[in-house]
Image (cartoon, rainbow, N blue to C red):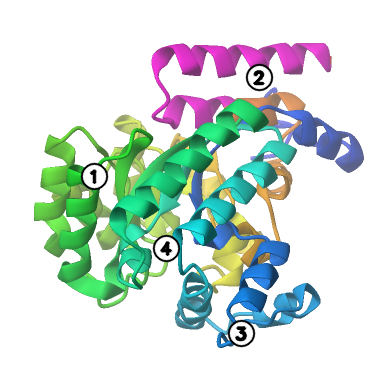
Amino acid sequence: MPDTAAPGREPAATGGLDDFIAGLPKAELHVHHVGSASPRIVAELAARHPDSKVPADPAALAAYFTFRDFAHFIELYLSVVDLIRDAEDVRLLTYEVARDLARQNVRYAELTVTPYSSTRRGIPAEAFMEAIEDARKAAEAELGVTLRWCFDIPGEAGLEAAEETTRLALDLRPEGLVSFGLGGPEIGVPRPQFKPYFDRARAAGLHSVPHAGETTGPQTIWDALTALGAERIGHGTSAAQDPALLAHLAEHRIPLEVCPTSNIATRAVASLEEHPIRRMVDAGVLVTVNSDDPPMFGTDLNTEYAVAARLLGLDPAGVAALARTAVEASFLDAAGKARLGAEIDAYTAARG
């Protein structure tokens, strides 16, 4: 299909489109808490904890965050997790992530938080919850960013982590918690084993948003849908390999949280030119664009929108439609969705 096939699918001049994207009010649905630590914050934490192998020089972090493959990414990611050692670290990180989101005109974000990684390192669970909630409230009041939490099971840590994450989510449920996820490596970590934990979380009113099909095939996505009751799929890259799955996702309006640059950095996709986002959209699947672990991948949400615009051949109207899809796919309440949708429409209209 040529890029000029329909309104909203026409290329625009890069500079003008980049400016449009920068000012566009946006929602981010797939971005990790620790993975959003900027080089400045990572370096500051590394300097505070000199026993870590993470460089304390921001300039050295770009080389450090060069991944051989997904397993190497997880190894380096966990080395940054190890820098978060007390509630003060947690609060600092959370507020600074919100500051970076605000700079990009992100109005609403569902931040994927892995509390097990912090509590098992000795941060008291109550102090962890207090730190993220304090940062959330300050971010909304001072930065105009609404944060919500997805509590994420680190799949590589097994059922012990699943049990503890479920306990933390349900027994200490912070006000901002809206969803329950599953991350980490997919290979060797089958989704169905986590069904009892997702059943409990869903029964308590949390939404199901597991990662699936990033480094494994379409069956992992089917498992996330059937066993875990997934309402959105994190990544879902391999869905494009299964026409029946694409049709199912489109029919049931189950969104995919697509993170193009992340997929290249972790070698889940060989190149941007081969990224399946176009096939997903052409199949009628609801696609949201997200940044995943932005500083680690040398990106941010504005950059991901620009990448998606190029891959999909979008003009400003098409980019604004992407932003509206993210709002609709979010777990923001109806009034919040209406407000943010209206803000996107007003901005688009004002830009002509």
User: Magenta-highlighted stretch: main secondary structure?
Assistant: helix
Q: Is residue 213 above or below residue 2?
A: below
Pointer 4 or 3: first along the chain: 3
Residue that appears at 14% across and 53% down:
197
Q: Which image quadrant: the N terminus? A: top right
Which one is closest to the eye, mark 4 or mark 3?
A: 3
* Left or right position of 107 against 284: right
Pointer 3 or 1: first along the chain: 3
The residue tagged 2 is 344
Q: Secondary structure at mark 4?
A: loop
Q: Are marks 2 and 1 in contact (CB under 8 Å)?
A: no
Using the rendered view, name the quadrant where residue 313 is placed.
Answer: top right
Judging depth in this view, the residue of 119 and 322 nearest the camera is 119
The residue tagged 1 is 172
Which one is closest to the eye, mark 2 or mark 1?
A: 1
Name the disc covering residue 50, or none.
3
Q: Which residues are magenta?
A: 324-351
Pointer 1 or 4: first along the chain: 1
Distance from the alpha carbon under mark 2 to that under mark 3: 44 Å
Distance from the alpha carbon under mark 4 to that under mark 3: 34 Å
The residue tagged 4 is 214
